[in-house]
Amino acid sequence: MIAVVDGKIYTMAGAPIDKGVLLIEYGKILDVGEELEIPKDCQIIDAKGKFVFPGFIDAHTHVGIFEEVIGEVGEDGNEWTDPVTPHLRAIDAVNPRDKAFEDAVKGGITCVFTGPGSANVIGGQSIAIKTHGHIIDKMVVKAPAGLKVAFGENPKRVYGEQKKMPSTRMGTAALLRETLVKAQNYKAKLESEISNPDKVIERDLKLEILCDVLDKKIPIRAHAHRADDILTAIRIAREFDVNIVIEHCTEGHLIAEVLAEYNIPAVVGPSLVSRAKYELKDVSFATPGLLANKGVKVALITDHPVIPVQYLPICAALAVKEGMREEDALAAITINPAEIIGISDQVGSLEKGKDADVVIWDGFPLDIKARPSHVIIDGKIVFSA
């Protein structure tokens, strides 16, 4: 058993606890509060003068899929040969030995959402994973956790250059609609045939995962920067009655009322970048605060390796600098991404029964000088300064 004592605990489920106690046993949070009885033979971590937070969560990355250091050999995020690849699974591409995992742990990032890139109209299935481990299957928190689709410049550029559809925004939307209709037909066929025990059902891996989308088991994770592309994504999601999360949402502040009206979450970023293409002409750290103020559930992201994953707290600090409320920025890297990904029953806050993913900071984490002194994942100390 581990007891973290005398630190200021931000549970992200209530008010901070001054000089609190956090008890960890068997990989879970046993209890958290003030003046708790500390069992004998307990490993004590003195957090006096420090800040105790749930491990931070990056809601959109390509950690382990676009690997660092090794270049093209480690780039497995985009299957450039077919614009519709829903059957691709991120778990088959993630390399736990990617240096990004070590950086994430040292930076206090204990969980990431990682998956395919945005070359395809439908890119494949993303997963949520812990950032410590050697066997990817044992690191998974949720798989699949979302189905990647992409709007805007990327798919039309990739396939336009190949003289294939889509080469326009209309083509992207049409291919997505066409595939969703195929999935509706496949689902109806399965439901009609399942009552016949003698019928051999021929599986279609491309359409199976889309049936999960239609059944709202997982959301569409829609890459969209421009406001018009965001609205197209929303239009199609409403047409087929599926759940959707907007990724990047660079111009989301222009249509914040629409996102709020339909209760659509936004994972915003990467914002610590140059305006490398037209879609990024309005990129700003003011966007997450503007969205949050309108009632949109916001998570902040690095889109690693676009921004190195360990700089997620810096992105939160810069969002505060540009007007986001501090409490909203902290929620955007803890409980909000957990809720958006669908893993808040396990991570995102320090509550009894949840995974013991805990980071002790030597300073307030939105201070650029702050560092983790201890990182605990699933109840194990995986980093100590």
Image (cartoon, rainbow, N blue to C red):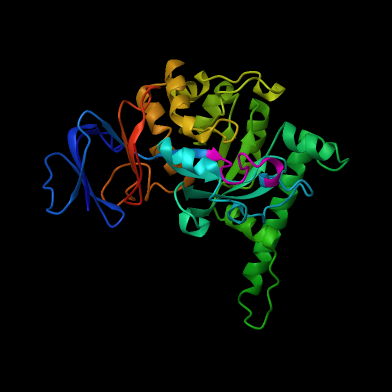
User: From what the image shows, is residue 185 above or below residue 250?
Assistant: below
Side (left or right) of 275 relative to 1:
right
Residue 314 image offset from top left, x and y in percent? 45, 25
Side (left or right) of 123 relative to 357:
right
Residue occupying image coordinates x 65% and y 68%? 190
Q: Is residue 261 magenta?
A: no
User: From what the image shows, is residue 348 above or below residue 19?
Assistant: below
- Of residues 24 and 350, which is closer to you in this image? 24
Q: Is residue 71 magenta?
A: yes
- Of residues 234 and 323, which is closer to you in this image? 323
Residue 64 seen in this snapshot: yes
Residue 229 image offset from top left, x and y in percent? 67, 31
Q: Which portion, as a residue range, is magenta?
A: 60-73
Query: How many numbered discs sit on the rendered protein?
Result: 0
Dominant SS of magenta comes to loop
- Of residues 108 and 373, which is closer to you in this image? 373
Side (left or right) of 228 relative to 51:
right
Residue occupying image coordinates x 42% and y 37%? 106
Tell me which corner region of the image, top left, top right, bottom left or bottom right, holds residue 195: bottom right
Residue 239 image offset from top left, x and y in percent? 64, 44
User: From what the image shows, is residue 188 above or below residue 41?
Assistant: below
Residue occupying image coordinates x 72% and y 46%? 177
